Image (cartoon, rainbow, N blue to C red):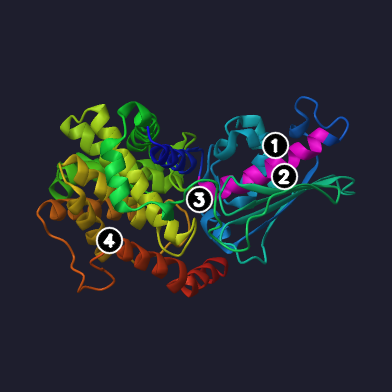
Amino acid sequence: MTGRQSEIISLIRREVKPALGCTEPIAVALSVAKAVEIIEGRCEGCGCPRWRLSAPFRIRVEVSGNILKNGMGVGIPGTGMIGLNIAAALGAVCGKSEYGLEVLHDLDEKSIARAKELVEGKKVSISIADTPRKLYVKACVSIGEAAVHESSAVIEDDHDNIVETWFDGNIIQSSHSHEGEGAEEEGISGKGVTVREIFDFANEIPYGDIAFILDSRTMNLALAREGLEGNYGLRVGKTISDGKYAEVFGSDFMSCAMAMTAAASDARMAGCTLPAMSNSGSGNQGITVTMPVIAYALKYGTDDERLARALVLSHLIAIHIKGYLGKLSALCGCVIASTGAACGITFLRGGGYEQVCAAIKNMIGNITGMVCDGAKVGCAMKVASGVSGAVQSAVLAMEGISVSEHDGIIEKDIEKTIMNLGQIGSVGMQSTDSMILNIMVCK
């Protein structure tokens, strides 16, 4: 393995990781969990077994508008409830920061019951922070009405990036990045690679070095099957796969890919307790970037090595595009994720670099502009639409058909095309983002 290949693998490992529950509420739970752990480690008697189940927590959480938008309507695993309040309470009662985006891994019935008591007793408050950052969470935790001790933890820019902690007014840790969104991380970022480099990497990297990516199949396929078997959310995937609608959806690959991908989103958005393999901090994006590719492999008997290379390509294309958008924006993540999936399907159908570029252009020329109006069960419908577009784009690309540089925001150069999409999502749609949030909070 070359040094550059090692850098790209590090990028994948940083951006592709398991997440239990929608990552915006999970970021809130993680911040609260860290704040509680600070109190546990510094207050006599606070670390005893089962202390958290009875501690008189008071929890104040400040979040950026995008965190609020994506946390208002999404199901919290195992609770039958939605929103950031219950996520914060669970972080206090049973969260462990060492689990990262699986912070609620130890969730059980007693923890859920105690968390609900805290919410019902109005011991948890959520407010909008005054911050320019798209992704920001600050959790402050105190014990009892007198607030003898108080701790806090701050997350910025990435859902599991804890940058500051305090205890009783004294700073413990501070590692803030530069002000604003998109600060540089250790190693290369999504902007630091190109489509050409990603394509060559997917073809040339030794299989043994990327076999770990098949964990995406294991994890997200389990979610898809759970969604198809259960009655989660809007049951988008289950309805598409229902035989009584065969005259509408058929039984071809496109309907199979739409059903499996939407079913995984149905389950996750409705609070299923199974984790998803996320991409760029989003579980839904991780589902959408992988499940159409996995569905293709299942239907056509693709071997593990070929699938792993397609998944690496799909993940990296999404990470690359997301690098120009930031973690959260007004642009629906399924636009980015399904573009990655289109590339993965094109690869599995024997497409080369030119066909992959054509698939990206076809996707950007198709569903750019789909807005994000928060994480919720309805996301499964957007996911299904994105998968449909991905399959169409891949098929057209394999026929040598591509949206031309004379159309809309498409340019002859693939990197400029991606940058245009990034500009629209991160800059052009800022007022749209604010309007969506205003509508949501005033309903």
The percent position of residue 350, horizontal first and vertical second, equals 15, 42
Looking at the picture, does residue 287 appear above or below residue 328? above
Residue drawn at the location 74% of the way across and 37% of the way down:
37
| Mark closest to the chain's N terminus, 2 or 3 | 3
Residue 93: assigned label: 1
Residue drawn at the location 27% of the way across and 43% of the way down:
200
Say which of marks 2 and 1 sits in front.
1
Residue drawn at the location 66% of the way across and 41% of the way down:
91
Kind of residue at badge 4: Ile
Residue 29 included in the magenta stretch of the image: yes
Left or right, 201 with reference to 157: left
Name the magenta segment's main secondary structure: helix
Q: Are marks 2 and 3 in contact (CB under 8 Å)?
A: no
| Mark closest to the chain's N terminus, 3 or 4 | 3
One can see residue 116 in this view: no
Give the alpha-carbon distance from disc 4 to disc 1, as whole Å. 48 Å
Kind of residue at badge 3: Val
| Mark closest to the chain's N terminus, 4 or 1 | 1
Viewer-closest of 193 and 301 = 193
Task: Give the residue pinned by disc 4.
Answer: 414
Kind of residue at badge 2: Leu
